[in-house]
Image (spheres, rainbow, N blue to C red):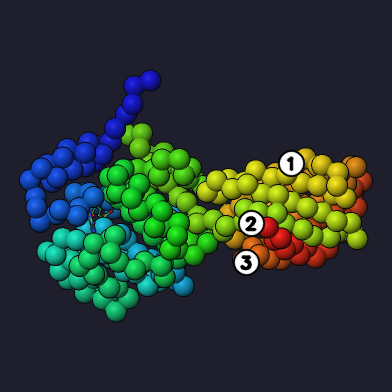
């Protein structure tokens, strides 16, 4: 199948080669300056659900347009940019837009900066930049934080959402998953359950038992800290919903059969990692 590349992608790839070959000033650069289009800025912030209460960080913030737009949505917003003149330009643009108090622009290398406080991170970097950043995002951001990338993915870390762009590239959203791998135990209606979870990023492979009998999980979903598990045992559907915090999951289970439904508290604890 013929692959379709957007103009901006082609521009990035060609400028990337140029920058690597020509500019010692950008020795640490993992992307040339190509601003996201105005409409794409809005789409990225929509995808990351950026709003009041968020701390948004654009890693490689260019002329500051994502940071300024996030501040205009009520977020505290912070840009990190290796190119000094672009940092100056961003600060001037933030003053002009009336959001200087909600924005900070740091002249730093994204691989040397602390972004752990972000609730939403945006990036528009080359594929190798995303690949280098991936372990740092997973290690430093809190579960539930969102990462939105313009154009490039994160290789085997599948996105939670992907919007295909007009010219075949698109936008990607990841939600940082809680680490839930291991063996969990809990009781429902005085019966013992065991849940063994294998984890690959946000993808879970469950092995479920009740009183030693193996059950089939109809659905298992992890989004940030929120875990959902659905199984039907002896005609009774159990839908578990909980929030993982360390070695505890707290939530509720909906138990339904033949049109009757009740809701019980669900509390699981991890007995082995
Ligand atoms: C494609 S532009 C994106 C700009 C902005 N995020 C946007 O979407 O409009 C990538 C930016 O990342 C910056 N950059 C590349 N490598 C960097 C690094 N190691 N540390 C900080 N900034 C970097 C470049 O200077 C450039 O301004």
Q: Which mark is residue 171?
A: none
Spatial CA distance of label 3 from label 1 is: 24 Å
Percent x, y of residue 141 = 45, 63
Mark whose residue sits in front, 3 or 2:
2
Depicted 100 relative to depicted 116: above or below? below
Residue visible at 13% across and 46% down in the picture: 19
Q: Secondary structure at mark 2?
A: loop
Residue 122 vs residue 180, the one in the foreground: 180
Q: Quadrant of the N terminus?
A: top left
Q: Determine which residue is flagged by label 1.
A: 218
**Disc with the residue nearer the chain's start (2 vs 1):** 1
Q: Determine which residue is flagged by label 2.
A: 273
- Would residue 49 be visible to someone looking at this image? no
Residue visible at 39% across and 43% down in the picture: 153
Q: Determine which residue is flagged by label 3.
A: 245
Percent x, y of residue 80 = 26, 64
Residue 120 vs residue 27, the one in the foreground: 27
């Amino acid at each position: 199948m013929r692959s379709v590349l957007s103009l901006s992608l082609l521009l990035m790839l060609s400028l990337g080669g140029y920058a690597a070959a020509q500019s010692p000033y950008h020795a640490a650069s993992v992307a040339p300056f190509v601003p996201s289009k105005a409409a794409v800025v809005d789409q990225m912030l929509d995808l990351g659900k950026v709003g009041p209460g968020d701390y948004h960080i654009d890693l490689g913030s260019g002329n500051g347009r994502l940071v300024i737009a996030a501040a205009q949505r009520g977020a505290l917003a912070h840009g990190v940019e290796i190119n000094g003149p672009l940092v100056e330009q961003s600060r001037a643009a933030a003053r002009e837009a009336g959001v200087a108090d909600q924005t900070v622009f740091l002249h730093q290398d994204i691989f040397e900066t602390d972004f752990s406080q972000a609730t939403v991170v945006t990036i528009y970097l080359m594929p190798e930049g995303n690949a280098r950043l991936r372990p740092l995002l997973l290690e430093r951001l809190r579960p539930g934080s969102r990462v939105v990338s313009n154009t490039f993915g994160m290789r085997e870390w599948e996105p939670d959402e992907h919007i295909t762009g007009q010219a075949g590239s698109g936008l990607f959203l990841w939600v940082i998953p809680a680490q839930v791998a291991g063996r969990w135990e809990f009781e429902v209606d005085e019966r013992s359950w065991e849940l063994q979870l294998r984890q690959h990023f946000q993808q879970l492979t469950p092995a479920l038992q009740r009183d030693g009998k193996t059950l089939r999980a109809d659905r298992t979903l992890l989004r940030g800290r929120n875990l959902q598990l659905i199984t039907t045992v002896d005609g009774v559907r159990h839908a578990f919903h909980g929030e993982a915090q360390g070695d505890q999951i707290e939530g509720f289970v909906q138990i339904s059969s033949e049109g009757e439904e009740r809701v019980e508290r669900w509390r699981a604890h991890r007995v082995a990692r």
